[in-house]
Amino acid sequence: MAFSRVHQEEIFKIIIRRKESAEQVSKKGIDDVTAQDTAQDTAQVNELIKKLILCFSGEMSRLELQTFLGIKHTNYFRESYLDPALEAGIIEMTIPERRNSKNQKYRLTQRGLKIKEKLLEGK
């Protein structure tokens, strides 16, 4: 019986908090993006995503963005630039229901536009 008691005491629980999904973040209206949010976002964005934000001009395909940044490896681009920016709600897909569509393009969200504005002011 002592074994089952020890066994029960060794059971533990791990709780992992999930970040807001890109869809949840991008659904926030422009009124929800305050100057303080933008300043915090700008400070938290890594250098790779800053480069991505600055190269945006309207809607752009993955290949256009990748070429503009001079990156040859698609997987590296997706893992280091595209996916983190999507997860952070900085960019969004034009066809979110078809992630791998050949017509897929990306655009800055309202939050991404505010960050770009702040980055351009700092230059």
Image (cartoon, rainbow, N blue to C red):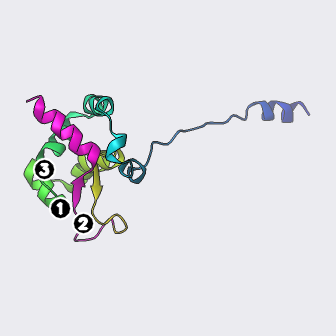
Any magenta on residue 64?
Answer: no
- Position of residue 56 relative to residue 60, above or below, is above
Q: Amino acid at mark 1?
A: Ser
Quarter of the image that includes the N terminus: top right
The image position of residue 113, as x and y in percent, is 21, 44
Front residue of 21/110: it is 110
Alpha carbon separation for disc pair 1 and 2: 6 Å
- Tell me the element at label 3: loop
Residue 61 numbered mark, or none? 1
Front residue of 5/110: it is 110
Q: Amino acid at mark 3?
A: Ile
- Position of residue 97 relative to residue 85, above or below, is below
Alpha carbon separation for disc pair 2 and 3: 19 Å
The image position of residue 23, as x and y in percent, is 40, 54
Q: Which residues are magenta?
A: 99-123
The image position of residue 20, as x and y in percent, is 44, 45
Query: What residue did someone put label 3 on?
Result: 71
Residue 104 numbered mark, or none? 2
User: In the displayed structure, does residue 86 sit left or right of residue 105?
Assistant: right
Disc nearer the start of the sequence (1/3):
1
Any magenta on residue 100?
Answer: yes
User: In the displayed structure, does residue 74 sit left or right of residue 36?
Assistant: left
- Tell me the element at label 2: loop
Q: Are marks 1 and 2 in contact (CB under 8 Å)?
A: yes
Q: Amino acid at mark 2?
A: Gln
Disc nearer the start of the sequence (2/3):
3
- The mark closer to the camera, 1 or 3, is 1
- The mark closer to the camera, 2 or 3, is 2
- Tell me the element at label 1: loop
